């Protein structure tokens, strides 16, 4: 019988690591071609309209930036947490925590005005998201409760909390729909490029990329967070206060997701609704992995998935392929990426036994 | 209102709904327990359940045959398990990420296939769902009869499976092998157990159960397919696996707790409570987290969980 074994291979040159996310994307587009063809779509027309819809002209390109902003932030949130093996799959809930805060300040913060209001919104949204992520981190470090499950379940708690608020105290007076009143005009994120929706939040997400990169490479927390991720026992023996590191990591991670929520409220919807996020928190997981948990990689993969999400709307209109193909492409590219990452370290050895 | 809550008919309805709503959780929890006992965490569960819900619904919509729908949902679950087998068992990549990848993939694919088949009609198509099967005589007993002995076939199946899985895991040689693989794969290998084969089989059985659990939502609980029909029940099953300490009976009891809260929430909604019903929708998830907190310190996680098995990396 022939058996398959994986054996460690000689280290590959560093450029291989850089090209594999791109190869993973290309491979996943080929795989996603199968359901598109089965759906009766014309592949050239489908992918052509997808990329045109996302990049084809000034308007589409800027819209792709708009969509990229929350994806960058949730991607960073997940990536920063995963680096320390804090399995934060709760960016979706943390996003809504930030969105609730932004809405409350935006609607009821009548005492504050001007740019100060936006600064307060950003701060409070960050804190709210961080707080929501700190709960599972606290439960993990103090009570050994599995973080995967708590972060996931808290997403549903948060979603129903938003529902309760929107049918309750935050509901727009006189409306029977689950939506909040509109936020005040001075809580709107300023538009940075005229005649578009290119807003302050996009700039914030780019700054966040730099900040996370800085934390990762230049600060003690970034170093300790990585140590905890690589080997928590060794980190403990090395004198790292692992509980504190995980908690801080969670605060920053959730805070980043909270910023995404503030951006969606203050620059896109101008009020809180239940469908504020189209699963940005979950897409963040895919983005973080495809970006290899590196801020720059996350930026690039967030942009790629923004292209897919924006372009798929056009594709759906032009060629009738349902927009849900995005989930197929996202999931496929994540799995392909995992396999590629594996084969950087290992090679297959066939042996007779 | 209080009087209404304590009436016999309310209690009967509540109990019946408790058993009904716990069915998908019990099935999925049993599947996840089998898988985790062999050393694999399958976070593909949520997407696999949605896939089962979609395939089961579409097959029944096309053929009118409910059991064919359930069968195809089970097969659909097993097909997705093949992905997990390839990624997490034979290639040994991160189980967390592989599972999440499958969930993202399967969720997208479920909606994609549904749209391809059904299109976008203004009113979603429906099927004629399973009807409860009253058990002769026993269903005549007051309170217990209509709630316990007038259930869906799949609910009875889930009850039968609790002792079956329990006996399999703890009283049979194959069950012992499976648990050894999850506890200490190197020891299992030494005594001649094919670690990766056992894990693959566990994933296949578990995947079938996930698929059936999903199909319960579209073929019995409801009669249509909606995007959020699973609504985190896969994650709840993972929580119940831990809550039950990887034990079928305790896991099922936890599932009943969730089912009860879910049923309570549905009942209150139908009575037209003044409080926003989302407060009650939140409750099952919140209590599940509290339940997890209460047991986590004493949880005995299968020692080989999350560890890919590679013979060359003994002790690695």
Image (tube, coloured by chain):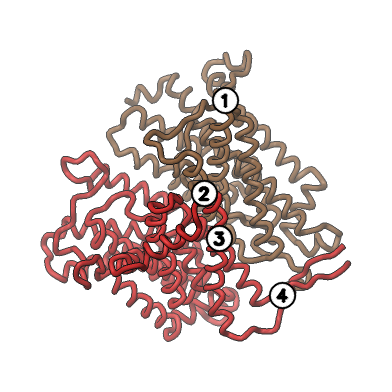
Chain colours: A red, B brown
Q: Chain of mark 2?
A: A
Q: Marks 1 and 2, how far apart in space?
A: 42 Å
Q: Marks 1 and 3, how far apart in space?
A: 39 Å
Q: Marks 4 and 2, how far apart in space?
A: 38 Å
Q: Which residue is mark 3?
A: A332
Q: Quadrant of residue A59?
A: bottom left
**Label 1 close to label 2 by CB (< 8 Å):** no
Indicate left or right for A215 with A293 as reference.
left
Mark 3 crowd level (few <14, some 14–19, many ≥20, 10 Å Cα): many
Tell me if residue A335 can be seen. yes
Residue A40's disc is 2
**N-terminal-most mark, 4 or 3:** 3
Q: Secondary structure at mark 1?
A: strand
Q: Marks 2 and 3, how far apart in space?
A: 20 Å
Q: Residue at x 29, y 74 (%)?
A: A203
Residue B151's disc is 1
**Label 4 close to label 2 by CB (< 8 Å):** no
Tell me if residue B30 can be seen. no
Indicate left or right for A114 with A266 as reference.
left
């Amino acid at each position: 019988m022939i058996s398959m074994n994986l054996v460690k291979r000689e280290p590959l040159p560093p450029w291989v690591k850089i090209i594999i996310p791109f190869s993973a994307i290309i491979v996943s587009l080929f795989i996603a071609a199968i359901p598109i063809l089965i759906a009766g779509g014309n592949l050239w027309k489908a992918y052509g309209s997808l990329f045109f819809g996302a990049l084809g002209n000034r308007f589409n390109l800027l819209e792709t930036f708009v969509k990229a902003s929350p994806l960058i932030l949730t991607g960073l949130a997940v990536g920063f947490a995963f680096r320390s093996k804090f399995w934060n799959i709760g960016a979706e809930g943390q996003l809504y925590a930030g969105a609730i805060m932004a809405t409350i300040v935006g609607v009821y913060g009548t005492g504050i005005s001007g740019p100060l209001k936006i600064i307060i919104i950003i701060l409070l949204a960050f804190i709210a998201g961080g707080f929501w992520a700190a709960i599972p981190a606290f439960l993990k470090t103090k009570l050994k409760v599995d973080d995967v499950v708590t972060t996931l379940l808290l997403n549903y708690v948060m979603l129903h909390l938003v529902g309760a608020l929107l049918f309750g105290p935050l509901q727009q007076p006189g409306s029977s729909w689950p939506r909040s009143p509109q936020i005040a005009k001075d809580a709107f994120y300023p538009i940075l490029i005229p005649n578009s929706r290119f807003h302050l939040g996009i700039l914030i997400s780019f700054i966040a990329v730099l900040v996370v990169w800085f934390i990762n490479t230049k600060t003690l927390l970034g170093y300790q967070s990585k140590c905890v991720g690589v080997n928590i026992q060794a980190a403990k023996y090395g004198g790292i206060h692992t509980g504190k590191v995980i908690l801080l990591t969670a605060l920053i991670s959730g805070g980043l997701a909270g910023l995404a929520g503030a951006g969606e409220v203050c620059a896109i919807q101008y009020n809180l609704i239940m469908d504020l996020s189209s699963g940005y928190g979950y897409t963040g997981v895919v983005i973080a992995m495809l970006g290899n948990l590196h801020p720059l990689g996350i930026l690039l993969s967030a942009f790629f998935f923004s292209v897919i999400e924006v372009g798929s709307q056009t594709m759906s209109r032009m060629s009738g392929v349902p927009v849900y193909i995005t989930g197929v492409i996202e999931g496929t590219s994540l799995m392909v990426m995992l396999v590629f990452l594996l084969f950087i370290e290992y090679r297959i050895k066939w042996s007779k036994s | 209102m209080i009087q209404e809550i304590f009436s016999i008919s309310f209690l009967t309805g509540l109990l019946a709904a408790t058993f009904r709503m716990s069915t998908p959780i019990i099935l999925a929890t049993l599947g996840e327990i089998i898988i985790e006992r062999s050393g694999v965490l399958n976070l593909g569960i949520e997407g696999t359940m949605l896939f089962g819900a979609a395939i089961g619904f579409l097959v029944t919509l096309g053929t009118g045959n409910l059991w064919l729908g359930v069968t195809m949902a089970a097969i659909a679950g097993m097909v997705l398990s093949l992905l997990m087998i390839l990624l997490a068992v034979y290639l040994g990549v991160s189980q967390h990420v592989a599972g999440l990848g499958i969930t993202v993939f399967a969720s997208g694919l479920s909606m994609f296939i549904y749209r391809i088949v059904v299109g976008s009609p203004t009113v979603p198509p429906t099927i004629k769902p399973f009807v409860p099967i009253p058990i002769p005589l026993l269903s005549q007993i007051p309170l217990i009869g209509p709630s316990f002995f007038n259930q869906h076939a799949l609910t009875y199946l889930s009850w039968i499976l609790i002792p079956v899985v329990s006996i399999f895991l703890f009283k049979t040689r194959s069950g012992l092998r499976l648990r050894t693989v999850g506890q200490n794969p190197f020891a299992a290998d030494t005594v001649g157990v094919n670690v990766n084969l056992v894990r693959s089989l566990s994933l296949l059985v578990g995947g079938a159960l996930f698929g059936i659990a999903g199909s319960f939502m579209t073929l019995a609980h409801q009669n249509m397919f909606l995007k959020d029909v699973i609504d985190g029940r896969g994650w709840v099953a993972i929580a119940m696996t831990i809550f039950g300490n990887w034990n079928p009976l305790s896991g099922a009891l936890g599932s009943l707790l969730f089912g009860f809260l879910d049923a309570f929430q549905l009942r209150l909604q139908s009575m037209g409570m003044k409080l926003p019903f989302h407060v009650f929708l939140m409750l099952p998830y919140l209590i599940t987290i509290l339940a997890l907190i209460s047991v986590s310190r004493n949880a005995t996680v299968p020692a080989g969980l999350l560890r890919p098995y590679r013979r060359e990396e003994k002790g690695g």
